[in-house]
Image: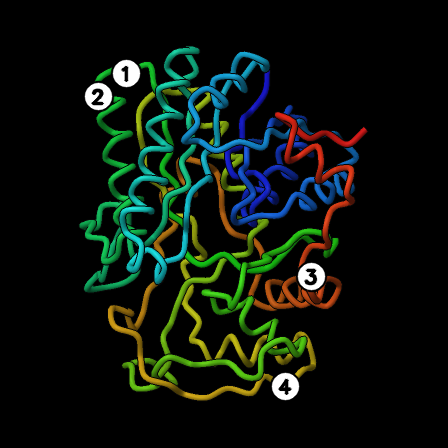
Amino acid sequence: MAVLITGGAGYIGSHTCVELLDAGFEVVILDNFINSKPEAIERIREITGKEVKTYTADLLNMEKVNQVFEENDIESVIHFAGLKAVGESVYYPLRYYHNNITGTLVLCEVMKAHNVKRLVFSSSATVYGMPDRVPISEDFPTAALNPYGRTKLMIEEILKDLYNSDQEWSIALLRYFNPIGAHKSGLIGEDPNGIPNNLMPYITQVAIGKLRELNVFGNQYSTKDGTGVRDYIHVVDLAKGHLRALEKVSTSSGVEAYNLGTGKGYSVLEMVSAFEKASREKIPYQIVEPRPGDAAICYSNPLKAREQLGWVAEKDIDQMCEDSWRWQKSNPNGYKNMQKDNLHLLKNGDFFMKK
């Protein structure tokens, strides 16, 4: 019996694959490699010593998705696949709605047809919009502020309706905050396309010399140093949260939302200082205008995940920065290109597996 990981070659997906493989699970990856690199599959194999069957396919292609279920004994699904850039979603809302929502509908239809009803969904703290207080609990009102966040919120509602229509389904909605860090090996990490949208990869690319300086969006917030405060969580802790959620949906039915965060907030300048300490590199920055819709302070209440999943974030901010820097220093240009023969397989075959 296998776990299907959609978007399994991505940043969070690849780390989750490592945790699952190390825990003895059989893993099948489905990824279209729009926001990920095939080299990540090789790195997963190198870390774990295990082969991973990987299909190059898009969730919008029902025939291909169905093929994955026909050729493998899938028991449960962890669903990461989706477009994820907040700013881009504002400019291309229809693309985001079509890709993220329709892709999820296709996945659920195929799961239903194959009687696979255990699902862990990669949601986001963006579903909370602009909460009026912190820490943020799962019972807070939801009100996403951009198309990306609304796709996450709409999918959550769809999955709730799915359970209401058939109570054999067991679904975990994981609302995570700000993942950073990388695997301790330095072999897998965050490798964004173009200029990073998130703070830590922007900082690391300044440190490595790819970017000139960090833009800090506003310093007039009601925080200790005027810069925005967020809940940063190590990606390995986050991956372990998916493992705990998978165990939960495998032994129960229902649909539940869980925050995955540390319950602590750090400002942008605190993150810069922590990274400078870890890397011994100076991070030049400039203060620019704040972005519309950015909250001053946002951090989680992770109590529900601790009580119901037995999960708690363990790694501190120093470890997050050290691992982020190890990844960037070891991979200054991100993942290397695959060899030509592997690229041929990815373009013309239904799946890629290292022989």
Q: Please say if the residues under marks 2 and 3 sit with CB atoms less than 8 Å apart.
A: no
Q: Residue at x 67, y 45 (%)?
A: 40
Residue 288 pos. (x, y %): 37, 85
Question: Whole-Å distance between the Cαs marked 1 and 4?
Answer: 54 Å
Q: CA distance from mark 2 to mark 3?
A: 43 Å
Left or right of 189 on screen, residue 340: right
Viewer-nearest residue: 105 or 251: 105
Query: How many discs appear?
Result: 4
On residue 276, which mark appears?
none
What's the residue at 36%, 28% (across, down)? 171
Where is mark 3, residue-wise? 327
Q: From mark 3 to mark 1, how far is it between C-alphas?
A: 43 Å
Location of residue 14 in the rendering, given as x and y in whole percent from the top left corner: 61, 43
Q: Which residue is mark 4?
A: 282
Question: Marks 4 and 2: CB-CB under 8 Å?
Answer: no
Q: Amino acid at mark 3?
A: Trp
For disc 2, the neighbor class at 10 Å (few under 14, some 14 to 19, many from 20) is few
Type of residue at label 4? Lys
CA–CA distance in space, label 1 to label 2: 6 Å
Indicate which label's residue lies in the foreground, 1 or 4: 4
The residue at which mark 1 appears reads as 167
Q: Residue at x 52, y 39 (%)?
A: 7
Identity, as a three-letter code, of the amino acid under mark 2:
Asn
Q: Which residue is mark 2?
A: 164
- Which amino acid, by three-letter code, is at mark 1? Gln
Question: Would you say the residues marked 3 and 4 are in contact, meaning their CB atoms lie under 8 Å apart?
Answer: no
Neighbourhood count class around disc 1 (C-alpha, 10 Å): few under 14, some 14–19, many 20 upward: few
The first of marks 4 and 2 along the sequence is 2
